[in-house]
């Protein structure tokens, strides 16, 4: 039996891996422009972190986490999301002691036991950012703008940005009571999960995609009717800032997100017309999470982006034809080829050569497959004459050049306006 990856996981192979690299390049530039620095988190955390941080009654904690006990009997969990881990690191290392805000970004694998489908796996990858220390809606704007910039730079246009407020500890309890009373009248029409959610965390009912539950929610009270003056003003300012920044959005009163730590702002970037799995990126404010995990009262806001989902929608990466492939005979020509390979890499020019001991004819075929625009041929004649033979892999034209002429051509072609070799 051939070895294979576990169900719900997969290998990312070229050229898809090059699209991943493109996403990371674009994201890292955006993070740098906005002043965010990278944090690298462990893939395992103590289970209690997610129970306290995400919420015991969420689907992630109750159904989807990969949890196990180590040899010391401690309960550990493969991280299902990164925000709780970032907050744990923020508290543990006193990251806010030298001043706020603290602005961090991350990228890496997450793990959830859910049904594998297009763009959704049990091991999946998220890229995200967290802005810790500001309660002002300008921080919300910065996080949304950062996410918007990444998606726009990748060429993903026509997305819907939907925004809502889920209130805070002042106004949300009254809304939960009102929603719970409304749902009780149609409880027999709700699925088992939603009946459980109705008691423990009624806002979670809005996450359900079952048609009978969606139908029951028609006419449900809206959180906007219950927002306290501070939450209402926060949302008003965010709307004004988004308009001033030229970012189109719409208010979506049923948007709640699936995690209990959210307060006030929640948002998603959605692909229009794609049903339940239409969010490419999402986030919101979590002003109470740091304190709930044992830190000082610290407001915060962040977002995460699904790497697999975004890459699915990127145009194929066109591999640029650059550099040289060095073809040589054995003996002294091979030693000369090694010198040329080393010098090419030292100067920053892509270069390859044969490592299988193939014939010149087979090496030329390998050069063609490598998509290098030039082959540099070295034999006894080239050694004796002190020149190199260049072969244009498109036209098959050949000419003799000095080594310095080769470097001048590669340097010219590497410039933005350099053109052909």
Image: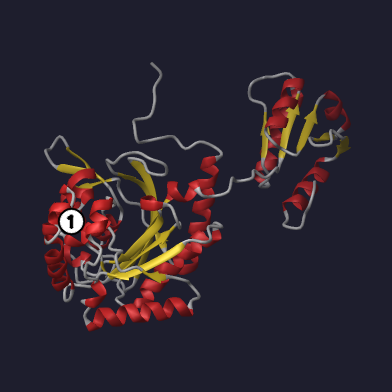
Residue found at x 84% / y 33%:
396
In which quarter of the view is residue 386 placed? top right
Residue found at x 21% / y 56%:
54
* Residue 381 can be seen, yes or no: yes
Find residue 212 and report its horizontal and vertical position in percent. 24, 52
Q: Is residue 82 above or below residue 172?
A: above
Q: Nearer the viewer, residue 40 or 274?
A: 274
Count of numbered marks: 1
Find residue 63 and report its horizontal and vertical position in percent. 20, 44
385 sits left or right of 201 in the view: right
Please identify the residue farthest to the top as the structure is shown. Answer: 1
In which quarter of the view is residue 330 placed? top right
Residue beneath disc 1: 55
Q: Residues within 10 Å of mark 1 (few under 14, many from 20)?
A: some
Find residue 409 and report its horizontal and vertical position in percent. 80, 47
* Residue 260 can be seen, yes or no: no
Q: Nearer the viewer, residue 3 or 106?
A: 3
In which quarter of the view is residue 378 placed? top right
Find residue 264 and report its horizontal and vertical position in percent. 27, 71
Q: Is residue 51 above or below residue 90?
A: above
Residue found at x 23% / y 54%:
213
Q: Nearer the viewer, residue 350 or 236?
A: 236
Q: Is residue 17 above or below residue 413?
A: above
245 sits left or right of 236 in the view: right
Q: Nearer the viewer, residue 222 or 317?
A: 222
């Amino acid at each position: 039996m051939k070895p294979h990856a576990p169900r719900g996981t997969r290998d990312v192979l070229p050229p898809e891996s090059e699209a991943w690299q493109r996403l990371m390049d674009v994201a890292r530039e955006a993070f740098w422009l906005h002043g965010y620095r990278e944090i690298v988190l462990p893939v395992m955390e103590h289970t209690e972190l997610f129970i306290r941080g995400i919420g015991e009654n969420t689907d992630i904690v109750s159904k989807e986490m990969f949890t196990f006990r180590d040899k010391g009997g401690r309960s550990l969990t493969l991280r299902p999301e990164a925000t709780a881990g970032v907050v744990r690191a923020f508290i543990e290392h006193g990251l806010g002691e030298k001043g706020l805000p603290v602005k961090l970004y991350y990228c890496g694998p997450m793990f959830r036991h859910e049904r594998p489908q297009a763009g959704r796996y049990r091991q999946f990858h998220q890229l995200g950012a967290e802005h810790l220390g500001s309660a002002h809606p300008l921080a919300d704007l910065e996080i949304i703008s950062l996410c918007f910039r990444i998606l726009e730079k990748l060429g993903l246009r026509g997305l819907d940005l939907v925004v809502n407020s889920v209130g805070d500890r002042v106004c949300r309890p009254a809304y939960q009571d009102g929603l719970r009373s409304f749902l009780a009248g149609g409880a027999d029409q709700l699925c088992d999960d939603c009946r459980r959610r109705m008691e423990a965390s009624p806002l979670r009912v809005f996450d359900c995609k079952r048609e009978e539950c969606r139908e029951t929610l028609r006419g449900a009270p809206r959180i906007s009717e219950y927002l306290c003056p501070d939450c209402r003003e926060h949302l008003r300012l965010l709307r004004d800032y988004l308009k001033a920044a030229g970012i189109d959005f719409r208010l979506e009163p049923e948007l709640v997100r699936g995690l209990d730590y959210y307060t006030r702002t929640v948002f998603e970037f959605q692909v229009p017309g794609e049903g339940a799995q239409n969010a490419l990126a999402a986030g919101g404010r979590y002003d109470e999470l740091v304190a709930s995990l044992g830190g000082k009262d610290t407001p915060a806001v962040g977002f995460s982006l699904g790497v697999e989902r975004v890459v699915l929608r990127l145009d194929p990466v066109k591999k640029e034809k650059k550099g040289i492939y060095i073809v040589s005979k054995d003996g002294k020509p091979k030693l000369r080829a090694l010198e040329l390979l080393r010098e090419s890499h030292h100067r920053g020019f892509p270069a390859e050569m044969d490592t299988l001991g193939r014939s010149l004819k087979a090496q030329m075929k390998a050069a063609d497959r490598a998509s290098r625009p030039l082959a540099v041929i070295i034999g006894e004649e080239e050694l004796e004459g002190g020149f190199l033979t260049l072969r244009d892999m498109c036209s098959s034209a050949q000419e003799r050049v000095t080594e310095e002429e080769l470097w001048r051509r590669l340097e010219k072609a590497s410039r933005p306006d350099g053109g052909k070799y």
